[in-house]
């Protein structure tokens, strides 16, 4: 149950309320999800709804279960009840590889996951490891390099020479090689200087609005995350405590006091 400290956030939003925040038909739907790791249950009857080409940001205190939501959608947790659907496909019990291939779900890790001694181009090609046709991976890699000049200029250089922001760009770009429809992004701003944080969110904005990607992200910088996202969810103790339009949560006094330093 929600702790007393956060009870001011109100009753847990109902699925109908979450659906009303969506601009169109629900594309990614999480219903009554209880999940965790082994015998440790983290999420309790968790619901999530987002339309295609929308963005949703999860905020909340450390240990609230934000990353566990991403892990569950991608296939990294033990799910004891509930369901996850993308479009008309139920993906609840599929493996991460199956989810990527059948439902277009890609996960961009929080940790630095580039291969430092591989070139930028080789790192991108690793994103197409599961493509049936190798030439498709090369084609998509070329498309990414043409899209992002920062990477194109360093295509033959080892990834270890990249700045923090450029490495984050490489991680995001590598996930695009499989042409996913859903991007799960874990802490995109972590460890980055402010100028690179702005760059990363500009890239995510472009992917959502120009390429119609659906983006679900966890962000430690709650203000930045809510400024970016169409929808914001506040998690506390593995439960959904509050949901609303990103801009509305920025103006919410309780959210401001507890999570925005206001």
Image (cartoon, rainbow, N blue to C red):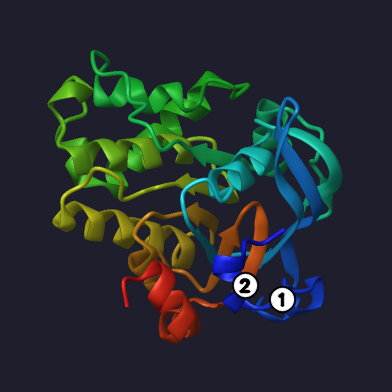
Q: Residues within 10 Å of mark 1 (few under 14, many from 20)?
A: few
Asked whether, in this view, residue 121 is left or right of residue 15, the answer is left
* Residue occupied by mark 2: 7
Q: Residue at x 42, y 27 (%)?
A: 138
Q: Is residue 211 visible?
A: yes
Where is residue 101 shown, x and y percent of the image? 68, 33
Where is residue 104 shown, x and y percent of the image? 64, 43
Say above or below: 84 vs 232.
Answer: above
Q: Is residue 51 visible?
A: no
In terms of image quadrants, where is residue 213? bottom right
Q: Along the line of sight, which residue is nearer the eye, 33 or 52? A: 33
Which residue extends farthest right?
A: 81
Say above or below: 43 vs 47.
Answer: above
Q: Along the line of sight, which residue is nearer the eye, 16 or 200? A: 16
Badge 1 element: loop
Badge 2 element: helix
Say above or below: 99 vs 14.
Answer: above
Q: Along the line of sight, which residue is nearer the eye, 34 or 71? A: 34
Q: Quadrant of the N terminus?
A: bottom right
Asked whether, in this view, residue 151 is left or right of residue 172, the answer is left
Q: Residue at x 69, y 32 (%)?
A: 77
Which residue extends farthest front?
A: 4
In terms of image quadrants, where is residue 12? bottom right
* Residue occupied by mark 1: 11
Say above or below: 162 vs 24.
Answer: above
Q: Residues within 10 Å of mark 2 (few under 14, many from 20)?
A: few
In terms of image quadrants, where is residue 54? bottom right
Asked whether, in this view, residue 237 is left or right of residue 15, the answer is left
Q: Quadrant of the C terminus?
A: bottom left
């Amino acid at each position: 149950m929600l702790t007393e400290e956060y009870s001011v956030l109100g009753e847990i939003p109902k699925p109908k309320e979450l659906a009303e925040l969506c601009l169109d038909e629900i594309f990614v739907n999480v219903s009554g999800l209880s999940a965790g790791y082994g015998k440790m249950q983290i999420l309790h009857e968790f619901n999530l709804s987002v339309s295609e080409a929308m963005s949703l940001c999860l905020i909340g205190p450390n240990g609230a279960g934000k990353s566990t939501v991403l892990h569950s959608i991608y296939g990294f947790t033990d799910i004891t009840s509930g369901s996850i659907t993308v479009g008309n496909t139920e993906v609840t019990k599929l493996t991460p590889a199956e989810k990527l291939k059948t439902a277009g779900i890609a996960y961009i890790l929080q940790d630095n996951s580039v291969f430092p001694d591989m070139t930028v181009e080789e790192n991108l090609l690793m994103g197409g490891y599961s493509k049936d046709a190798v030439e498709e991976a090369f084609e998509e890699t070329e498309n990414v390099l043409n899209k992002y000049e920062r990477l194109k200029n360093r295509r033959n250089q080892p990834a270890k020479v990249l700045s923090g922001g450029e490495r984050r760009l490489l991680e995001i770009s590598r996930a695009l090689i499989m042409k996913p429809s859903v991007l799960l992004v874990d802490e995109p701003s972590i460890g980055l200087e402010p100028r690179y944080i702005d760059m990363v969110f500009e890239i995510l904005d472009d992917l959502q609005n120009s390429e119609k990607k659906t983006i679900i992200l966890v962000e430690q910088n709650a203000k930045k995350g809510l400024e970016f996202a169409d929808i914001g969810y506040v998690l506390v103790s593995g439960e959904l405590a509050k949901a609303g339009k990103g801009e509305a949560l920025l103006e919410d006094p309780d959210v401001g006091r507890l999570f925005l330093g206001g």
